[in-house]
Image (spheres, helix red, strand yellow):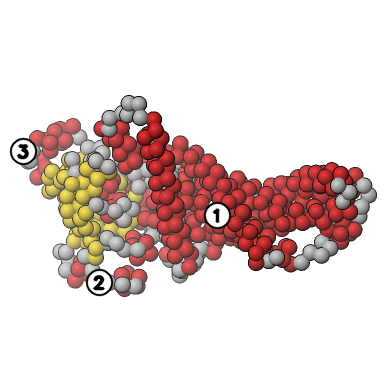
Amino acid sequence: METLDQIAKKPGRAEEDGNAPVLAVENLHKSFGSQKVLNGISLSVKRGETLAVLGRSGTGKSVLLRIIIGLQQPDSGSVRIHSQDIAGLALDQMGEIRKKMGFLFQHAALYDSLTVEQNVGFPLQHHKKEMSKSERAERVAALLAEVGMESAAQKMPSDISGGMQKRIGLARALALEPEILLLDEPTAGLDPIGSSEIDDLVLKLKSERQVASIVVTHDLHSARTIADRLALLNQGNVVIEGTFEELQQSDDEFVREFLKHS
Amino acid sequence: MIDSKSTATVTLNSELPRPQIALPSSAENSSKGLIIQFLEWFGDLGIFFFQVLRAAVTPPFEFRELIRQLDEIGSKSLPLVALAGAATGVVLSMEARFSLTRFGAKSLLPAAIVFSVIHETGPIITGLVVSGRVGAGIGAELASMKVTEQIDAIEASAVNPYRLLAATRILACTLMLPLLTLAADCCGVVMGWVTQALAEPLSLHQFVNNGFNGASFNDVLPPTFKTMAFGLIIGLIACFQGMRTEGGAAGVGRAATSSVVLSSLFVILADVVLVKLIIIFFP
């Protein structure tokens, strides 16, 4: 069995070949009881690329993200991060993979007993033990400034709005400088200016750090702004995958209906 | 997210025909179902314990969280445990005085009180009080974290929740129970003396001398250290019930209630076994 260090240091295909996907899911199936949620989904994202996953509520978009980060197990299919299959990895081994990923939860999932500052500093406190307290505080302040929340550092999550919690959740997801970002409804509950700031941040991460992102969203405007490709899900399948223009040109009835109402 | 259990239940309820008059078979089925449920619960508890154990013995160790839990579980339970121990000492003293006077054995009163408190009432009262206060607290806290995806967020941050949340709480319960038991024992003995002294003048020195006359370490240490098993049971069950919760606020309520009920029940059952073992190995 591979050691944690070996897993962490294993050179991915992406490092050898710039065009290889950083993250690839293949033929993913997931059911809850008799309800099929994912029915053979295959998607991939390259370094510096953003994929927006669209679809009606309950089509398994969030489940897809949870499977990618290993919070749920698929019934069949594989998830590969840097060409390594994550199936069957023990919790600590999976932890090494997760350090390369940032996850923004749909409802932010901030730790309600910690302040905003402690929430953002949580991954640093556990994984950057070489950092001094002042270095950690500086990094947290920079992350909060990046999402425009520096004034809320000492507040508790219960004292800030849902949209603000979302931004703090994003700052926490960025704390370990991930190579892969998984964002579940990043702009839901945000005002138009806040949404546009998050979009700018995702674009900045893409251009400056070559972060690969999968963004689950209902916000077509945001998806169009930040994503290189869009994938539309329906009944557990990818109906269409391509650029926004390709989606617009599609003859598929569901695609046309979805775009018409978005 | 879709609740797999509720989906399955809805499907079963709509697909299966309702039984007409089949009381015996339905009773049989329900008892079989209960047994299977109990065995499943026990199996899951075993797997959970193994995962926590594996996380607890591998680095990184969560010392800061452990110290926080020692304070939360130990020092914050102290007033309640001390009060319960003191009340038990008073009741035991009054009851023992009444019974022993009746049988002409009043001179054995200090020994009867001290031995009862140290051997049994101190440890079990501590176990039950802690299972109420700490069991409910841990169960509700972890359940609330589970339903608001905070435990998932910990996992997504590459931190092992079994190590951070469960191992620290279980270890803190296991370490603090003997210390809390000593506090309950002290309060019980002192209040036993106060009750006696109010009825009939008797110095504390005399009471303690008579009470501990002939007592050995075997009378104090095994009953005190058996509460480590109570702590393990309380911590393990409360963490398990909390971390497997589903179903929003109602689920949190269920987790808190079941943590208290199950941990109290298993503390009492464990006491039966441990008392027998202590009698065999520390006569």
Query: Residue B246 appears in which quarter of the rendering?
Result: top left
Question: Please, what secondary structure does the residue beneath circle 2 have?
Answer: loop
Q: CA distance from mark 2 to mark 1?
A: 44 Å
Say if mark 3 contacts mark 2, CB within 8 Å. no
The residue that appears at 35% across and 30% down in the rendered structure is: B22
Q: Position of residue B15 (x, y in %)?
A: 25, 32
Check chain identity for marks 1 and 3: say if they share one.
no
Q: Is residue B217 above or below residue B78?
A: below
Q: Amino acid at mark 1?
A: Ile
Residue corresponding to mark 1? B233
In the picture provided, is A225 more to the left or to the right than A143?
Answer: left
Q: Helix or strand or loop: what does disc 3 sit on?
A: loop
| Crowdedness near tag 3: few (<14), some (14–19) or many (≥20) residues, C-alpha within 10 Å | few
Relative depth, front residue between B29 and A194: B29
Residue carrying label 2:
A11
Q: Which chain does the residue under circle 1 lie in? A: B
Q: Nearer the viewer, residue A162 or B274?
A: B274
- The residue under label 3 is A251
Q: Is residue A258 above or below residue B124?
A: above
| Residue shown at 20% from the left, 35% from the top | A262
Q: Residues within 10 Å of mark 1 (few under 14, many from 20)?
A: many
Amino acid type shown at disc 3: Asp
Residue drawn at (90%, 58%) of the image: B206
Instruction: Kindly report the distance in space between the C-alpha atoms of the residues bearing marks 3 and 2.
Output: 42 Å
- Side of B210 where B240 appears, left or right: left
| Amino acid carrying mark 2 in the image | Pro
Does label 2 lie on the same chain as label 3?
yes
Picture coordinates of residue B225, whole percent (x, y):
65, 62
